[in-house]
Amino acid sequence: MATGLEASTHRRGPMGGVYESIADVGAAVVNAVVTLGDMTLFAWQTLKWLMTRLPRRETLFANMYQIGVLSLPVVALTGTFIGMVLAVQSYTQFKAFGLETQLGGMINKTMFRELGPVLAATMLAGRVGSAMAAELGTMRVTEQIDALSSMGANPIQYLVVPRFLSCLLLIPSLTIMAIFMGVMGGMVYSVFFLDIDMQHYWSNAHKIVENWDLFYGIVKSVFFGATIGLLSCYRGFHCQPGAEGVGSAATTAFVQSFVVIIMLDLFLSIFLDQVYLVLWPHSPVALAL
């Protein structure tokens, strides 16, 4: 027969599980708040050093080459096939209403506003963000970052600022490349495989796409690049010990960057649409909205 203490413990078992669950949720919330605050301080220190002293030219150029130039082929290739996929998926629906010549406007506007900046940011987060987190994580594990601090150098100034600035400056160029290749890919497939008249294709596209659409995508890309640079460097700086910690930092950097990019895309779209309504309240697009 169970003793009184054992029976009492048995009776409190279900409630004990509830208390443990509540404690786990509370710990997760506290951990999230602490991480958010730590990220905010990390971003503030990065911006402070960026405004105080720019990185050396050779350091900055080396990072720009790794982040921007080496990312061009994959961004261009992906953008080309995304434009073709848009043409394939939209042609049947447009043809059903006799609007196949309007396909160019839809493809171009979609690439300018959404797929171009999001595609470039996703490629940058996957190729560059993970690599930066793994590189800085390895430096943390091997105590190279601590060695920099012990020598009187600021690790954020020497390691984070060049990478952050490279992401910030080069992602607009990658976005323009993704947009251009997507537009060309959609045009090639529409004209040469779907037999759409090229003159009507470009004429209708020119009527629909505005200069604002390019500005729309470039503004988004700047925020995406800043997000990738900060999150990737933060995860690398706060890497857990061991090879598993380095791999986890690289994976977490990409996942968090992608999630934040999608969230920013929503809020920036809402904000930029409202700006458009304020600047051009009598335009056909504004009246439609």
Image (cartoon, rainbow, N blue to C red):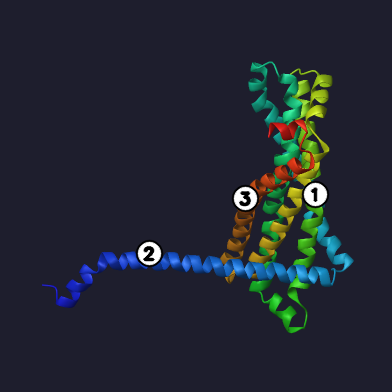
Toward the left, the furthest residue is 1
In this picture, is 221 found above or below 229? above
Q: Quadrant of the C terminus?
A: top right
The residue that disc 1 covers is: 172
Q: Is residue 132 visible?
A: yes
From the top left corner, tell me how far across and down residue 221 is, in percent.
75, 49
Q: Residues within 10 Å of mark 2 (few under 14, many from 20)?
A: few
Q: Quadrant of the N terminus?
A: bottom left
| Front-most of residues 219 and 121 | 219
Q: Amino acid at mark 3?
A: Met
| Viewer-side label of 3, 1 | 3
On the image, which quarter does residue 16 sit in? bottom left
Cα distance between the residues tagged 1 and 2 = 45 Å
Q: Is residue 73 visible?
A: no
Q: Secondary structure at mark 1?
A: helix
Q: Secondary structure at mark 2?
A: helix
Which of marks 1 and 3 precedes in the sequence?
1
Cα distance between the residues tagged 2 and 3 = 29 Å
On the image, which quarter does residue 288 sit in? top right
Cα distance between the residues tagged 3 and 1 = 19 Å
On the rendered structure, is 123 left or right of 215? left
Q: Secondary structure at mark 3?
A: helix
Q: Amino acid at mark 2?
A: Ser
The residue that disc 3 covers is: 263
Q: Residue at x 60, y 54 (%)?
A: 255
In this picture, is 221 found above or below 239? above
Q: Residue at x 82, y 51 (%)?
A: 69
The residue that disc 2 covers is: 21
Which of marks 2 and 1 precedes in the sequence?
2
